[in-house]
Image (spheres, rainbow, N blue to C red):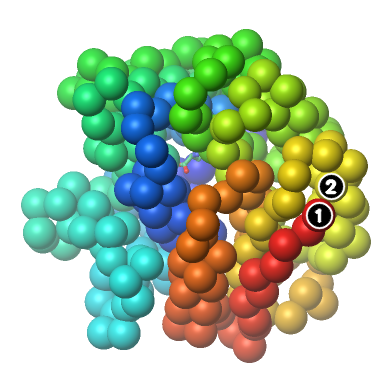
Amino acid sequence: MNYRHAFHAGNFADLVKHAALLDLLAHMPRPLSVIDTHAGRGLYDLSGAEAQRSGEAQAGIGQLMQAGDLPAALQPLRTAVGQLNGGGATRLYPGSPLLIAGALRKGDTYLACELRPEEHAALTQALTPWPAARTVCADGYGEAAAKLPREGEALVLIDPPFEKSDDYRRCVEALTAIAAKNPRAVVMIWLPLKDLETFDSFVRDAEDANVGPLLIAEARMRPLTDPMKMNGCALVLARAPAGMAQTLQSICDWTVGALGQGGSARIWTAT
Ligand SMILES: C[S@@+](CC[C@H](N)C(=O)[O-])C[C@H]1O[C@@H](n2cnc3c(N)ncnc32)[C@H](O)[C@@H]1O
């Protein structure tokens, strides 16, 4: 496992995922159980060597914080990042754990799973202020099915590094297991968009899981001509709440238009 999210924190793909996540957290009924299968370290220092070397945060959250035309769907993310930085320069970026923990309400629970011991140690420290947030240093796919409550409102974020080809298969298996255990659970899977064959094949496999309609948001940042590059990202949602399609359209339209290079946004439903 070589993946380090510190190189990518605050990039365009984090913006799409985190804006959608905040919208789900704001609108889902309570009490809510949240499971984050691939949590990362929870908090990222954008002045650190990794972020400085990649430049991805500057091209992502750096632009968002300055944007004059930010749509309402991205405002909560700007507010959260602004608060984390005390209204000053954007040096810190919250991972999904801090965003989720900050949105918890009385009676909610949150389980953050992270496999890498050093990332898990940082995650545990980052979540110290939130007693309702628990962490586990374990495989998130297995934890999601095992720890998901059988009843009640639930939200599962599946955000793997996709450094191994079996992440696609394991996402579909997790989707199937989660729906079987708690049919009310809302699931949001993040995926990279490199080439359309890989993505289409994933969507077909996810459709075969028969978990109901899948809401799909594609932020293609540039034409998908070079499959070696991450040309964009996608979110695949099961049991997406009403109104989510418009929110995703707004998030992806802005991200592609402001940060992309001749790409396009596409929101559609697979059944
Ligand atoms: C894309 S990052 C997560 C980013 C985080 N969800 C966020 O939005 O801030 C993926 C993380 O998954 C971890 N990881 C890899 N395989 C895992 C597995 N099977 N179970 C749990 N965590 C895993 C990696 O160490 C990495 O920190």
Front in this rendered view, residue 242 or 196: 242
Indicate which disc residue 253 carries: none
Mark 1 Cα within 10 Å, few/some/many (few <14, many 20+)? few
Residue 14: image location, x then y, percent: 48, 55
Judge left or right: residue 165 versus residue 75. right
Judge left or right: residue 85 versus residue 4. left
Location of residue 169 with respect to 243 vertically, above or below: above
| Residue position marked by numbered label 2 in the rendering | 207
Residue 193: image location, x then y, percent: 72, 61
Mark 2 Cα within 10 Å, few/some/many (few <14, many 20+)? some
Q: Would you identify the image quadrant in which residue 271 lies?
A: bottom right
Query: At 15% across and 52% down in the image, what residue appears?
Result: 83
Query: At 88% across and 51% down in the image, what residue appears?
Result: 204
Q: Is residue 251 visible?
A: yes
- SS for callout 1: loop
- SS for callout 2: helix
Q: Would you identify the image quadrant in which residue 226 lies?
A: bottom right
- Identity, as a three-letter code, of the amino acid under mark 2: Glu
Q: Give the number of marks.
A: 2
Location of residue 196 with respect to 208 vertically, above or below: below
Judge left or right: residue 49 versus residue 2. left
Residue 116: image location, x then y, percent: 54, 21
Asked if marks 1 and 2 touch (Cβ < 8 Å), the reply is: yes
Where ligand 1 lies, by image quadrant? top right
| Residue position marked by numbered label 1 in the rendering | 271
Query: At 37% across and 15% down in the image, what residue appears?
Result: 134
Residue 69: image location, x then y, percent: 31, 85
Question: Tag 2 or tag 1, which sits nearer the N-term?
Answer: 2
